[in-house]
Image (cartoon, rainbow, N blue to C red):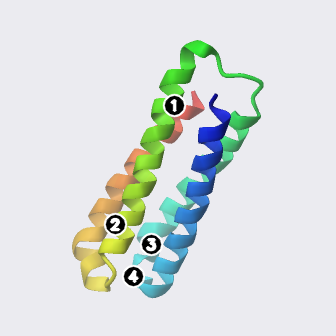
Amino acid sequence: MISQPIGYLISAITSTSVIITKFIRSVLLSHADLAPVNYDLSDLRLLLKLIKEQPAIPESLQSQTLLVLECCGNALIHIDAVLGKYTGPEQWVTYGRTEMANCRSSIAIFREALAL
């Protein structure tokens, strides 16, 4: 039941990481802000792979786990949107940096919830 959403999320993380790398190349100033986000996503990807390899998640935890996975997916969508919206250095410093810090906090919370 959870294996398929985890697979989708792993794929989405890979896509978002590619978008982050391209953004860093176009807005060099964003590197210090986005490198930690990319690291957190890589860590989340590893955690999801480990969860996917588990024999079974107890049924009592599956609905909560699916909710956390959905929230992770929404955070990835928000990251992609922020990177698409603030494409220049000025926009990044003025708006994007703060929004990305919020996204990173969300990813950290979801990662910790899944690690339990």
Which is more toward the observer, 59 or 22? Answer: 59
Residue denoted by label 3: 32
Which residue is at 62% across, 55% downward?
11
Q: In which quarter of the image is the N terminus?
A: top right
- Residues under numbered marks 3 and 1 in contact, where contact means CB atoms less than 8 Å apart: no
Residue denoted by label 1: 66
Which residue is at 46% across, 68% downward?
34
Q: Which amino acid does label 4 sit on?
A: Leu
Report crowding for label 4: few under 14, some 14 to 19, many 20 or more residues within 10 A (C-alpha): some
Dot placed on the residue nearer the N-terminal end, 2 or 1 = 1
Residue denoted by label 2: 82
- Residues under numbered marks 1 and 4 in contact, where contact means CB atoms less than 8 Å apart: no
Q: In this view, does 55 lie to the left or right of 2?
A: right
Q: In which quarter of the image is the C terminus?
A: top right
The mark lying in front, picked from 2 and 1, is: 1
Report crowding for label 2: few under 14, some 14 to 19, many 20 or more residues within 10 A (C-alpha): some
Dot placed on the residue nearer the N-terminal end, 1 or 4 = 4
Q: Distance between the residues labelled 4 and 2?
A: 15 Å
- Residues under numbered marks 2 and 1 in contact, where contact means CB atoms less than 8 Å apart: no
Residue denoted by label 4: 29
Q: How far apart are marks 3 and 4 (CA)?
A: 7 Å
Please determine whether, in this image, residue 106 is positioned above or below residue 90. Answer: above
Q: Which amino acid does label 3 sit on?
A: Ala
